[in-house]
Image: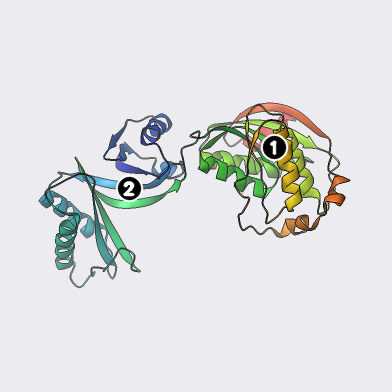
Amino acid sequence: MTLILVHPSLQTDLKGLARTLQTRLNTPAHIQDGIVVLRTKRIQEITRIFGIAKVSVVIECHSQFQAISKAIIEVGRRTILQGQNFFVKVNVLEHHDFEARDLEFAAMGAIAAELAGISNPAKSEHEANTATIAAYVGKRAFVSLREYEGAGGRISGALGNASCAITHQMSLASCIAACKAGFFLSELLLLYVDEEDLRTNAKLARALAEKAGLNSQKLALVRVTKVREEKTRILQLDYAAARVLAMVKSRNTILPLSLAIHPHWFIELAMKEIYHAGKIPFVPLMFAELEDKNQEGAKSVSREAFMKVRLVPTTTTKHIVLKIGPNYLHDIIDSI
């Protein structure tokens, strides 16, 4: 098992993160000096969990100047490549009888001497072609062998439950943004016009489940009929989604709307559906700079033109709970 440090993002509750990791990985997770420490082989899975800034694969050593310096030198010997610059970054997490910069200076000097002619010290960790060796010094000391960027955001469920809808590609981005913000999507509406639509949106729903790290997913399959294959299509689907979301149990609703795609009047119209139902609309992509050539015509649709076609019949086929696995897509198709 590999020893790792899990660094929380700024919005993350540390105790909540430790509990999430213990539950997801079925392994003990301990909090130390503002970091979660655990042993696991499932590093890539951890990097996909929301609420994590980065993950460090580390070795442990005594929390003393000489011991830490020796460990840093050993890591440098093992990880720095020929022609690659290097930099040592020491993070002192609690009071010690030495300063971080003193340890950095000593370790970089020792590595430079040992790797003379192979590698040179960098002036900062941001220089090009630079390998950064990070050390974290608290009650225990750790030196990083490798670091991975985390998914960021908040832990799923930190802001409570919400309902979301999959209507097209942009709606997937909206749902993912809601998860990253801290919502747990307790129910996902999957809207479709025909079987091709169902297959496409089912793939998006699966991508969402994998991104959110779900083992199962609660879905409501909603068929939409009499949608025109014109520039009003996305507006009809998103308006149908707003009307159905207004009727679901969750008070928090995620709408896949953006000023880059939807007319201003349409956003107001869709949000009124949610407000009038006594629910709270959240619009993660409202001001995002999006570009979708397939939806370019939607923004030019007038309110008058849309009002003639806005009400499209919807039929909720059924509510299902599916395990995320190789048969996911077939299970959805078979359910209708």
Q: Residue 67's x, y, as percent?
A: 12, 49
Which element is circle 1 on? strand
Say which residue label 2 marks.
56
Image-based side of 316 in relation to 96, left or right: right
Amino acid marked by disc 2? Ser
Q: Residues within 10 Å of mark 1 (few under 14, many from 20)?
A: many
- Residue under the point 68% across and 33% down: 332
Q: Residue 33's x, y, as percent?
A: 26, 40
Q: Residue 134's x, y, as percent?
A: 27, 54
> Above or below — where is 111 with respect to 42?
below
- Residue with the most extreme right position: 308
- Residue with the most extreme bottom position: 117
Say which residue label 1 marks.
190
Q: Quadrant of the C terminus?
A: top right
Q: Residue 231's x, y, as percent?
A: 81, 54
The quadrant in which residue 94 appears is: top left
